[in-house]
Amino acid sequence: QVQLVESGGGLVQAGGSLRLSCVASGIIFSINPMGWYRQAPGKQRELVAVITTSGSTNYADSVKGRFTISRDNAKNTAYLQMNSLKPEDTAVYYCNARIYTMDNRWNNYWGRGTQVTVSS
């Protein structure tokens, strides 16, 4: 069974940094893309950043220049380096991945989320 597990969330002061990790486990043939989404209280889930197998990236305007997404294909892992954090970055951050599995099709998976809280 394929699973995504996030880690690295926590409480940080404004201006600080955090690094999130997402590890995909199970029988996996390919992952493309991997991404991070976030959901703040009372708001819809939104895309933060996404990265393809070849390393192409896309970011939400609100995080450009502050967040960096990367991945280690050999480890089925994606990272989100978050710098210059702001209180408005406070949210639950979810890992998302489109994965080709042993049932010979692409499936979409979500992690359970990790809380990021930025104090002012």
Image (cartoon, grey):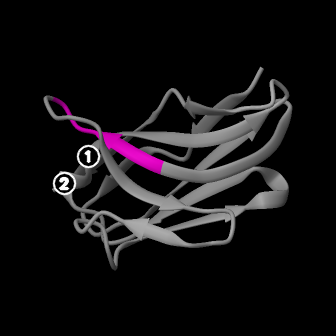
Q: Nearer the viewer, residue 49 or 23?
A: 49
Q: Could you say where residue 53 lies in the image, as x and y percent from the top left? A: 68, 63
Q: Nearer the viewer, residue 48 or 113?
A: 48
Image quarter of residue 99: top right
Q: Secondary structure at mark 1?
A: loop
Residue in the picture at 24% in, 68% down: 61
Q: Is residue 12 left or right of residue 97?
A: left
Q: Nearer the viewer, residue 63 or 47?
A: 47
* Badge 2 amino acid: Pro
Q: Nearer the viewer, residue 35 or 79?
A: 35
Q: Secondary structure at mark 2?
A: helix
Total count of labels:
2
Residue in the picture at 39% in, 45% down: 37
Q: Residues within 10 Å of mark 2 (few under 14, many from 20)?
A: some
Give the Cα distance between marks 2 and 1. Answer: 6 Å
Q: Quadrant of the N terminus?
A: top right
Q: Residues within 10 Å of mark 1 (few under 14, many from 20)?
A: many
* Badge 1 amino acid: Thr
Q: Could you say where residue 116 lies in the image, as x and y percent from the top left? A: 36, 44
Would you name the residue on which mark 1 appears?
90
Q: Main secondary structure of the magenta part?
A: strand
- Give the number of the disc on residue 87: 2
- Magenta segment boundaries in residue numbering: 36-41
Q: Could you say where residue 75 lies in the image, as x and y percent from the top left? A: 81, 53
Label 2 with label 1: CB-CB less than 8 Å: yes
Residue in the picture at 22% in, 37% down: 40
